[in-house]
Amino acid sequence: MKSKFKILLFILLIGSPCLINAQETSGSRAYLFDAFKPATVKMKNGSRAEATFNYDGKKQEMVYYVNNQLMILDGIQQIDTIFIEKRMFVPAGKGFREVVRLSKGVLQIDWKISRLYAGKKGAYGQVTHGGTVQNINPGYLSGYLSTQSTDNKSDQVFTTVLKNEYYLLTKGKPVKFNSLKTLLKLFPEDLHPAIKSYIKDEKLSMDVPEDVHKLAEFCVNLNQ
C-alpha cells in the first residue's frame, strides 16, 4: 500500500508521464548508467519524489519505471533538479545536463550517446562481426558508462559512442564547448600554451569525459 502511495504521489508531482513502446529495438536507447538507479526528483515548488531512473543520452530523455512499465519523464519545466545517487542533473532545453562542480565554477555535461552494433557474442565472450573476432571488455568508459553492452534477450552486442557537449558557467551563463578549439576560445590567448602543455603532459583527450572534467578544473584555476 505504501509503495502504491509513493507511485501515485510521484505521478501527481510530475504530471502525466509517457509510456514507452515495449517493441523498441535494443539499439534505440543509449543509457548513461549501466542499470536504473535510485533517484530523487526535486520540483521547483520544493516538493520531492523518488523513483528509479536512467538517462537516455540518445533521445535526451529521463526514463523510470512504474509498475514494471518504462516511462518517459514529462513536464520537465516543473523540475528543479534530479539527484541520481551522488550525481546531479538539471533541465536544459528538451533534455537534461549533468552538473559537475569545480573548485571555482561549474561544468555541465550534455550527454550525447549512441549505440553502434558491434556484432554477436559467442560462447567464450567474444564478438564476431564481418568475419573478425574481438574480445569483449565489460569495463567502463572512464567510470561513466559501459563501453559495450549486450541485449539480454539476444546475443547482439552494441558499442557506446560519445559526442558530448560541455558548458562552463561564465558570469552565471553557460558557454558551450565540444573541442579543444572551442574550449580555448573561452580563455585569454596568453593562457593557451599552458593549457596545451597540460593536455600533453597529462595525456588528456577531449573524447573522455573525466579528462574534460580534469581539464576544465585546470583551466578555471589557471584563469584566476
Image: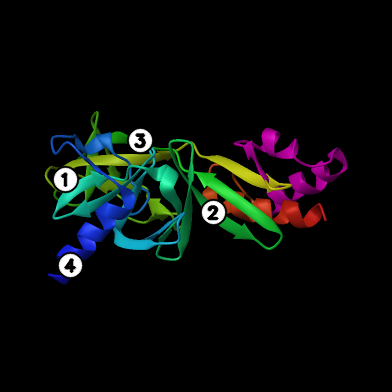
| Residue named by callout 1 | 122
Is 217 rendered above or below residue 121? Answer: below
Whole-angstrom CA distance, mark 3 to mark 2, is: 19 Å
Residue 95 at x, y = what percent? 43, 40
Dot placed on the residue nearer the N-terminal end, 1 or 4: 4
Q: Please state which of residues 84 and 209 is positioned toward the viewer in this rendering.
A: 84
The residue mark sitting in front, 1 or 4, is: 4
Magenta region's main secondary structure?
Answer: helix
Q: Which mark is residue 3?
A: 4
- Report which residue position mark 3 lands on: 59
The residue beneath circle 2 is: 99
Task: Count neighbours of disc 1 (C-alpha within 10 A) and say few if under 14, some if 14 to 19, many if 20 or more.
Answer: some
Q: Tell me the SS state at disc 1.
A: loop
Circle 3 sits in a helix, a strand or a loop, which is it? loop
| Most distant residue in the right direction | 190
Residue 56: x %, y % from top left: 34, 43
| Residue 108 versus residue 88 in the image, above or below | above
Report the amino acid beneath label 4. Answer: Ser
Question: In the picture shown, does residue 42 fall above or below 212?
Answer: below
Tell me where residue 181 appears, x and y as whole percent: 69, 33
Residue range (magenta): 173-202
